[in-house]
């Protein structure tokens, strides 16, 4: 599965990614500004990153970003593009000290000016500077000879439409009447058309056969005096080709706003993604934030990877995608620092074996069912068995020592002679009997079997506990009740936020109505009837739990589960 949200410092993650695999990188790093509101999410991961780039001045910030952009350059395909979004704080430094150096001045294509707002605090009365309303987006490519670019168009302004597309067919279809003459002849272009010839020294732009075809199609317009013109229909025009001043990439409506300060409009990312990729291409956003890039990439059928150091950013993006996606959307994976015990314990056995052996550095058996209890091997060939259970007993060890020998007799005997492990058993925990049998085999038969617990391979945590109560209900109108819910989550890691879906449908999945609720209290209005309310709690490790409250509102408010 390619589509992936990854929690972590992007530098570490980028280093693990294969070279020349990405078609487009859009990055919107935190700006160079020592202000607290640059901390968006406020969780541990983000605060760490904030301190990281702020422990020095501009030089430090540039060095921090530069080492990341170097990795981005490496993983970009030769046909790929990068768009780096920044503002006045450091734009000049970023272009000269990072992008020109890493991508080369030759591979610079545009400095896009994006008008991000029309009003700004710093242009209030009494301000001693002009209002700052623009961001910069630097567009570079990896290789000027190989990159791909798909021109974009934007709608004509209404003024232009009114003045140019000022005619319409009886059915209301708007068109512009375009001159039919041309400066140069091109075949059959000197003839008389309904008593009209082109002005002296000019020719018709089309042959007579073409004119006849236009006539038949109703594409000729005649002025009051009978002069012919060609109709250019507004609905057939692509619009103006986009230049490097971007004014119109704004939020489409209130619903698009999730409620965090640095969210970028989907229209902005749509333009960037469409101009540089095609369906199926791979888009990376290493400073994911609330996930605008991956949400748009997903809509446009691109593959995507998003990285953020903040648990909140990753989880909000997950909720956003869950809300946006339907049954036909591609699945995606979320990679956190910790794994949820229940999920691993109950995962499909084959998937679990494959995952845990890979995490251990081994090679999983690629067919289901295993081979006499052997589920994979180490790189050096010793067999690995996986037990997706707790308290593994003595018999498992006994049987494994037999099948390990059968699996590769010569390696078994060689390792036995060299006092090296002959094989590995992975499980959630081992009983006393298993541990004693391992000790006996070692002592009496020189056979070393390693018992490895899952939490030694991957960090595991329990998902947060969650309890929901109805704390108030008031009838506000004849058939309407205002109900207050209080959610209380508990987790060792600490609770990050709650998220609410007031008309939850298990088949459609969790579609958040309130995405980030730090307090855990919500008041919502309900009409008489049956309602399912789902609440998610997310902890500081990104682990989550969900509870569904079933309500019957009918004269009284009754919880039925
Ligand atoms: C300006 S926001 C991105 C906003 C995003 N373009 C959007 O539309 O929602 C920057 C993001 O970078 C993340 N970040 C900062 N340092 C990071 C790092 N070293 N690795 C990964 N993410 C980081 C922050 O947590 C924050 O979510």
Image (tube, helix red, strand yellow):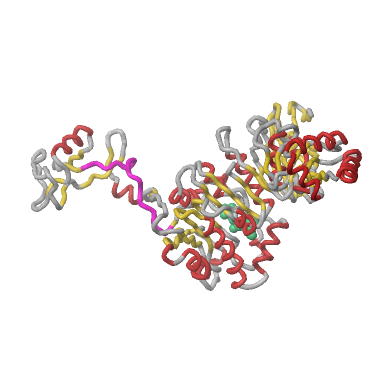
Q: Quadrant of ligand 1?
A: bottom right
Q: Locate the N terminus and report the quarter of the image it occupies.
A: top right
Residue at 20 percent across and 39 percent down: it is: 221
* 500 vs 378, nearest the viewer: 378
* 416 vs 334, nearest the viewer: 416
x then y, percent, for residue 368: 67, 32
Q: Is residue 274 above or below residue 84?
A: above
* 484 vs 314, nearest the viewer: 314
Residue at 52 percent across and 49 percent down: it is: 283
Q: Is residue 208 left or right of residue 105?
A: left
Residue 126, picture quadrant: bottom right
x then y, percent, for residue 523: 72, 41
Q: Locate the C terminus and report the quarter of the image it occupies.
A: top right
Residue at 85 percent across and 35 percent down: it is: 398
Magenta region:
230-245
Q: Is residue 240 above or below residue 126?
A: above
x then y, percent, for residue 237: 33, 44
Q: Is residue 556 above or below residue 51?
A: above
x then y, percent, for residue 293: 54, 50
Residue 18 visible in image: yes
Residue 233, picture quadrant: top left
């Amino acid at each position: 599965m390619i589509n992936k949200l990854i929690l972590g410092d992007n530098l570490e993650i980028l280093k693990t990614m294969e070279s020349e695999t990405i078609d487009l990188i859009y990055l919107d790093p935190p700006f160079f500004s020592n202000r607290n509101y640059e901390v968006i999410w406020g969780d541990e991961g983000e605060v760490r990153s904030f301190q990281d780039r702020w422990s020095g001045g501009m030089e430090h910030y540039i060095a921090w970003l530069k080492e990341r952009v170097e990795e981005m350059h490496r993983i970009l395909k030769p046909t790929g593009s990068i768009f780096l979004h920044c503002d006045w704080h450091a734009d000049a430094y970023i272009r000269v000290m990072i992008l020109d150096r890493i991508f080369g001045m030759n591979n610079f294509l545009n400095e896009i000016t994006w008008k991000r707002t029309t009003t700004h605090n710093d242009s209030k009365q009494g301000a001693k500077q002009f209002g700052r309303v623009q961001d910069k987006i630097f567009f570079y490519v990896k290789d000027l000879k190989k990159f791909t670019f798909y021109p974009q168009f934007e709608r004509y302004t209404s003024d232009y439409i009114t003045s140019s597309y000022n005619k319409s067919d009886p059915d209301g279809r708007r068109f512009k009447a375009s001159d039919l003459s041309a400066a140069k002849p091109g075949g059959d272009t000197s003839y008389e058309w309904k008593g009209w010839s082109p002005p002296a020294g000019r020719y018709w732009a089309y042959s007579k056969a073409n004119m006849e075809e236009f006539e038949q199609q109703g594409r000729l317009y005649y002025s009051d005096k009978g002069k012919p013109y060609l109709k250019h229909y507004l609905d057939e025009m692509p619009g103006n080709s986009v230049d490097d001043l971007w004014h119109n990439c704004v939020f489409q409506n209130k619903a698009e706003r999730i409620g965090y300060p640095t969210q970028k409009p989907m229209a902005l990312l749509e333009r960037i993604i469409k101009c540089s990729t095609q369906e199926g291409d791979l888009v990376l956003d290493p400073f994911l934030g609330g996930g605008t890039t991956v949400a748009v990439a997903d809509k446009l059928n691109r593959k995507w990877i998003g990285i953020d150091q903040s648990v909140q950013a990753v989880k909000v993006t997950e909720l956003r995608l869950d809300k946006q996606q339907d049954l036909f959307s591609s699945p995606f994976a979320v990679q956190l620092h910790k794994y949820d015990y229940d999920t691993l314990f109950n995962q499909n056995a084959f998937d679990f074996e494959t995952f845990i052996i890979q995490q251990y550095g081994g090679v999983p058996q690629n067919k289901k069912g295993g081979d006499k209890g052997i589920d994979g091997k180490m790189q050096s060939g010793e067999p690995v068995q996986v037990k997706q259970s707790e308290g593994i007993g003595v018999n498992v060890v006994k049987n494994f020592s037999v099948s390990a020998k059968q699996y590769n007799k010569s390696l078994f005997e060689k390792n036995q002679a060299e006092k090296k492990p002959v094989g590995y058993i992975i499980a959630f925990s081992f009983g006393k009997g298993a541990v004693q049998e391992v000790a006996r085999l070692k002592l009496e038969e020189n056979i070393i079997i390693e018992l490895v617990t899952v939490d030694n391979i991957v960090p595991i945590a329990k998902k947060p506990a969650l309890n929901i109560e109805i704390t108030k209900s008031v009838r506000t109108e004849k058939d309407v009740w205002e109900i207050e819910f209080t959610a209380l989550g508990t987790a060792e890691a600490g609770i990050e936020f709650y998220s609410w879906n007031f008309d939850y449908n298990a088949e459609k999945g969790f579609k958040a109505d309130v995405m980030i609720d730090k307090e855990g209290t919500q008041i919502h209005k309900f009409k008489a009837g049956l309602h399912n309310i789902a609440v998610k709690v997310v902890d500081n490790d990104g682990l989550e739990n969900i509870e569904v409250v079933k309500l019957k509102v009918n004269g009284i408010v009754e919880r039925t589960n």
